[in-house]
């Protein structure tokens, strides 16, 4: 599936006050800006037109735009973030996405974070997690059905979002953390297993034929390479400190 546009938001000055459980320490703001800039450049290099949103200090986590919307060819579903500290980010994203798509919204008491929503071809895997509740998942599934997409639910434990542990590349290949690789709904896929010591590298995205992955995970890098993918590895250290990975920093469509 090709990507023509992506929404990104520049991290705000109070980025380090966002939500985190990583225990990796406080991010360096200047370095986060540099890493974000490199991320944007990689998307541009892969032929993606960027819609760059200004810093928003009202929401320290607002660079992690992926959590606020699920976008496909036919619609944009505006989520309702599971952590109340992020509630309100989605209204600002709705204004942007309504220029490009028909928008639908997840409503109270439903909650959904985009990081829990994995699309594989025309099917969605919806993680039920600490951020995405059953009501939110069911609302999302119903909206997607209306537009012709099937979905299934997956219980997410031991990680923040579904896509913290599993992501689709292309041609039937998924990247999946070893500890969840036996999930029966993924049994038909060819799996690249990500070892526990490289678990952060399970969050990669495919953009117009190239894999964007975090730098510093040689075992996973080699495995992806041996499947024949072109790879761009980006330094993501400051986002990892805030529990974010490569998928979270953009809404791609
Ligand atoms: C949060 O806890 O919401 C942010 N600090 C990180 C969000 C990462 N988003 C994602 O994986 N999709």
Image (cartoon, rainbow, N blue to C red):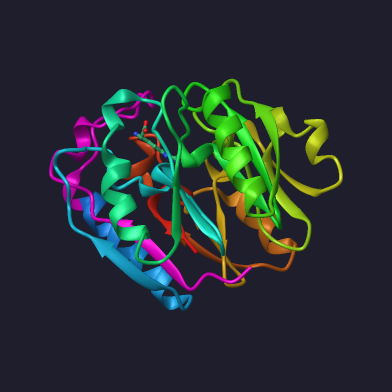
Please provide percent x and percent y for residue 175. Answer: 68, 47
Horizontally, residue 103 falls left or right of residue 126, namely left
Q: How many marks?
A: 0
Q: Is residue 164 visible?
A: yes
Quadrant occupied by the N terminus: bottom right
Q: Is residue 245 visible?
A: no
Please provide percent x and percent y for residue 16. Answer: 21, 35
Please provide percent x and percent y for residue 57. Answer: 14, 42
Image vertical order of residue 139 relative to residue 172, above or below: above
Image vertical order of residue 72 relative to residue 174, above or below: below
Q: Give the magenta range.
A: 1-30
Horizontally, residue 22 falls left or right of residue 180, namely left
Image vertical order of residue 121 relative to residue 44, above or below: above
Horizontally, residue 136 falls left or right of residue 78, namely right
Magenta segment main secondary structure: loop
Q: Residue at x 52, y 29 (%)?
A: 136
Q: Residue at x 25, y 50 (%)?
A: 32
Please provide percent x and percent y for residue 46. Answer: 48, 75
Taking the magenta stretch, the answer to whether it contains residue 22 is yes
């Amino acid at each position: 599936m090709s990507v023509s546009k992506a929404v990104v938001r520049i991290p705000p000055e109070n980025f380090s006050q966002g939500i985190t459980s990583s225990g990796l320490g406080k991010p360096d703001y200047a370095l986060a800006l540099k890493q974000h800039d490199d991320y944007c450049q990689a998307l541009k290099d892969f032929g993606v037109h960027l819609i760059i949103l200004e810093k928003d200090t009202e929401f320290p986590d607002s660079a992690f735009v992926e959590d606020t919307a699920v976008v496909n060819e036919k619609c944009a579903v505006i989520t309702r973030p599971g952590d109340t500290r992020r509630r309100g980010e989605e209204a600002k994203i709705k204004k942007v996405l309504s220029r490009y798509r028909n928008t639908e919204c997840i409503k109270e008491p439903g909650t959904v974070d985009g990081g829990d929503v994995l699309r594989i071809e025309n099917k969605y895997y919806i993680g039920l997690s600490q951020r995405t509740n059953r009501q939110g998942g069911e609302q999302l599934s119903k909206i997607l059905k209306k537009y012709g997409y099937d979905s299934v639910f997956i219980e997410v434990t031991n990680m923040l979002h579904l896509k913290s542990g599993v992501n689709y590349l292309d041609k039937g290949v998924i990247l999946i953390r070893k500890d969840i690789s036996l999930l029966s709904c993924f049994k038909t896929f060819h799996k690249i297993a990500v070892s526990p010591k490289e678990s952060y590298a399970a969050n990669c995205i495919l953009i117009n034929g190239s894999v964007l992955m975090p730098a510093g995970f040689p075992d996973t890098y080699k495995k992806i390479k041996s499947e024949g993918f072109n790879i761009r590895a980006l330094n993501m250290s400051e986002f990892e400190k805030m529990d974010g990975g490569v998928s979270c920093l953009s809404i791609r469509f």
